Amino acid sequence: MKSWKVLTLGIALSSCSIPPNFAEEENRFTQITEDWQDPVYRQYDFWMGVRKVNWMSRVPGEFFYPDEGTLHSQWMYSTLNGKALLEFTIGDVPYDEQGNYTYGFSVRYFDTEKERWVMAQEWPAGPNTTNGVLDQLQGFYRFGGLQVLSTYWIPNSDPPVERTRRYTFTDIRPEGYIWHWMNTHDQGNTWTESSMAENSMVEPEAAWPALGEPMPNYDGGRACTDEKFKAFDDLAGEWTGTVSKNGQEKPAVLTGYLMLGGCAVMNYLEFENDGEDYVLLEVRSIFRAKPEWWVYQLDSRHGTSHTYQAGTIDGDLFTFSENRHFVIPDELVNHSLSQLERDDASALRKTVWTALNENELAFEWWVRETPGAGWEKEAEFNFTR
């Protein structure tokens, strides 16, 4: 794997201990703190733990679903102190004669400004075929169930056909639930069911991987084997270091995990930010339509929403710029990825990497008030093993 050396460092690397409030808390990535106990944030808690999924696709011309579909295993975790829910899925058997397995990931949280549950997901369409965790839906809890929706153009339809899809969780009970995927092409006048899944609990709590171990659906990285998917594999494991912000240097920790058959890398960045404990969740993958890396970002604070940064790795110094217009605006507003273009010129935030190899990490946060204005360095991070 290529190693990127440090080009510019504003402060020298220094040894430091992990902040006590990060180091001493067992399973700190899955704990639910008191400030996230409001029932609205706990509406998805029925999905926690280790699950078994019987996924059945509708057979054209058949009135009933088959009794048995394709079995999948799931691991579900609360994260960011209880703000968000993580899903890791893998098929129990290959879906084709080439021995390819299904892999899935999702992250969802309740957006207090939208008053909606907002989810982003990545289900590779095949080997080395990903969407950069850009597939998004949003919705709400009503009538005893949960619904999330999104609207987009059907790919390659001529003339263009707009589709709204809907995922519905029903029959929610302690031992499991039923999930339905339905589509409409006429603004909800008629719906066609695509598939259904029976979800059953195996264990009420999923064990979090030990440091240095991957997430449960990594599976040896067999889904995305192209070298381009390995660019951020060095993030895996625990890194300790410092953050320099507002003229002060404080301890920081970055913890990374390989996941999703090798198609994505997840990491947590932890430090004290403006006097409060701060955790940033990032998930990195490639948008297959273009040779670009995309980073899903969501932090642990109340009232904040997710965003995306995009970048192209080219040389030793590379930049990821915020592209907020890729965030789903509304479940019924057409949000086709094929119609969106990356727009770094309008970014108000960016991350500049200066080192990424097996021994050191270094990156900087830059901000500006308006597009076209000058950039100011907000923070600088330096880590070692």
Image (tube, rainbow, N blue to C red):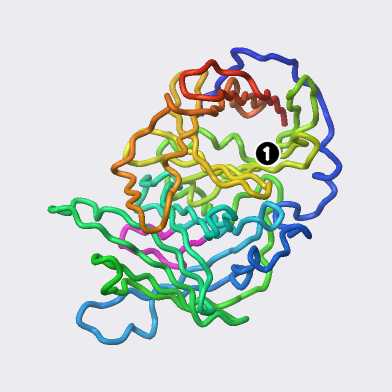
Of the 4 image quadrants, the one containing the C terminus is top right
Instruction: Tell me if 238 is positioned left or right of 19 in this view.
Output: left
Q: Which amino acid type is marked by label 1?
A: Leu
> In this picture, is 100 found above or below 234?
below
In magenta segment, residue 97: yes
Q: Secondary structure at mark 1?
A: strand
298 to the left or right of 225: right
Residue at image point 67% right, 45% down: 212
The residue shown at (54%, 66%) is 74
Q: Residue 182 or 140: which is nearer the viewer?
A: 140
Along the viewing direction, whichever of 219 and 195 lies nearer the viewer: 195
Quarter where residue 366 is shown: top right
Q: Majority secondary structure of the magenta segment? A: loop
Image coords of residue 313 (percent x, y): 45, 26
Left or right of residue 79: residue 123: left
Q: Residue 11: image x %, image y %? A: 73, 15
Q: Position of residue 45 (x, y in %)?
A: 63, 69
Instruction: Find the magenta span and give its range.
Output: 89-102
The residue that appears at 56% across and 18% down in the rendered structure is 375
Give the percent coordinates (x, y) of residue 59: 26, 77
Front-most of residues 371 and 34: 371
Closest to the observer: 65 or 148?
Answer: 148
* Residue beneath disc 1: 269
Residue 314 forms part of the magenta stretch: no
Label 1 neighbour load within 10 Å: few <14, some 14-19, many 20+? some
Q: Is residue 254 above or below residue 263?
A: above
Above or below for 232 versus 24: above
* Residue located farthest toward the left when viewing the structure as drawn: 159
